[in-house]
Image (tube, rainbow, N blue to C red):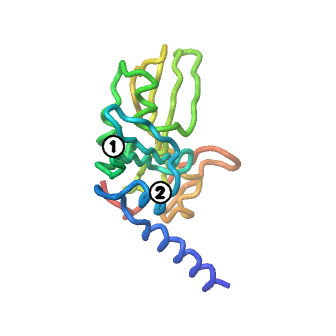
Amino acid sequence: MYRRMMLVCLLGLTACAALAPIVPGQTAAQVRTAHGAPTRIVDQAGGGELWQYATQPFGTTFVQVRFDASGQVVETWDGLAPERLAQIQPGMTLAAVRERLGPQRSVAHFALSGETVYDWNISNSGNPGIATYFNVHVRDEAVVRTSTTYEYPRDGMFFGGFGIGAGSGSGVGIGINIGVGSR
């Protein structure tokens, strides 16, 4: 039973790793065959399309693929890459943020500050097992500021490090990783 479980996990990881990258020159048909239908297609000025592949609320990418008028890939990028997140600045409209980052993971309104906070899962490869969220604080449909939130697992042992639980039931815990990753 254990061997079968390990084989299934290994095959699953291999399938994820085998997903071919999208490269300039590919046709729209090739991209659709390899990656499926996009979440959204946006017509571009002067012809062409922008295909967006969103993975929220559980994934950590927002792949965008720009096609020219002939239907060939011109460029591709991850809207949730650190250099893209750095482009979100105070004063931007919420619509512009959503265009760059895709659909959000969740939304919370804070009555005392008057802010609505939209968040996206982002990669935290330096600390596996620690959920990381990019937050955009909005007031009157405009960005006020951005922040990052880390959600530490309740049981660090489950995620591969030494952990100290923070009580029982639901909630946020504290995890201590010893010798895992680098910063």
Judge the density around disc 2: few (<14), some (14-19), many (≥20) Cα neighbours within 10 Å.
Answer: few
Residue at the image point whose x is 50% and y is 53% from the top: 175
Location of residue 47 with respect to 159 vertically, above or below: above
Which one is nearer the viewer's eye here, 117 or 26?
Answer: 26
Q: How many numbered marks does the figure carry?
A: 2
Residue at the image point whose x is 51% and y is 19% from the top: 115
Secondary structure of the residue carrying tag 1 is: loop
Residue identifier under label 2 = 32
Residue identifier under label 1 = 69
Residue 12 picture location, percent across and down: 54, 72
The alpha-carbon separation of the residues under discs 2 and 1 comes to: 16 Å
Location of residue 163 with respect to 139 vertically, above or below: below
Which one is nearer the viewer's eye here, 39 or 181?
Answer: 39
Labelled pair 2, 1 in contact (Cβ < 8 Å): no
Q: What's the amino acid at mark 1?
A: Ala
Drawn side of residue 17 relative to residue 104, left or right: left
Secondary structure of the residue carrying tag 2 is: helix
Q: What's the amino acid at mark 2?
A: Arg
Query: Of all residues shown, which one is farthest toward the right?
Result: 169
Which one is nearer the viewer's eye here, 177 or 6?
Answer: 6
Location of residue 104 with respect to 181 vertically, above or below: above
Q: Nearer the viewer, mark 2 or mark 1?
A: 1
Residue at the image point whose x is 45% and y is 44% from the top: 52
